[in-house]
Image (cartoon, rainbow, N blue to C red):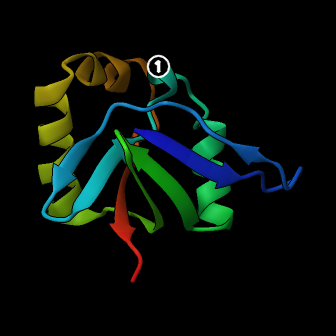
Amino acid sequence: LLLTTTGRRSGKKQTPPLFYSTAGEAYVVAGSKGGSDTPPGWYLNLRANPVVEVQVGREQFTAHARVATGKEREQLWAQMVQLTPLYDDYQKKTKREIPVVVLQKQG
């Protein structure tokens, strides 16, 4: 998945590639940054401006990003770990809770 966010300070578009999962019609990504104690820049950007651009294969769309919490986060995190077991290792490397972000198509 390619996630395009707008830099919270620079205003420039940034597009990192990310592992993803799905939840119904939405896409799900994790802000792991390899288990770093600081979140990835794209996560900080979407917290400042939750309207993002997403590309999966040939499909491109505008989405609204929100951080999953509670039971939803637990379920989606387990799904992400099942997809990519490294996420479990990343969580063990940091004290911060790795955020799980839901990307919901607009319109």
43 with respect to 57 (left or right):
right
Q: Is residue 18 above or below residue 44?
A: above
Residue 60 percent location from the top left of the image: 44, 55
Can you give x and y, in whole percent of width and height, for residue 96 in the image?
46, 38
Q: What is the three-letter code of the residue carrying label 1?
A: Gly
Residue depicted at 10% across the width and 28% down the height: 82
Number of dots carrying numbers: 1
The local crowd at label 1, few if under 14, some if 14 to 19, many if 20 or more residues have their Cα within 10 Å, is: some
For the N terminus, which image quadrant? top left
Image height of 102 relative to 28, above or below: below
- For label 1, the SS is helix
Which residue lies under the disc numbered 1? 34
Left or right, 83 with reference to 58: left
- 94, above or below 26, in the image: above
Q: Along the line of sight, which residue is nearer the eye, 77 or 46?
A: 46
Q: Tell me which corner region of the image, top left, top right, bottom left or bottom right, holds residue 81.
A: top left
Which residue is situated farthest in the right direction here?
10
The quarter of the displayed image where residue 27 is located: bottom left
Q: Residue 71, how many percent across, how many down?
A: 14, 62
Quarter of the figure with residue 14: top right
Left or right, residue 34 beside residue 45: left
Looking at this view, name the residue that lies furthest to the front. 58
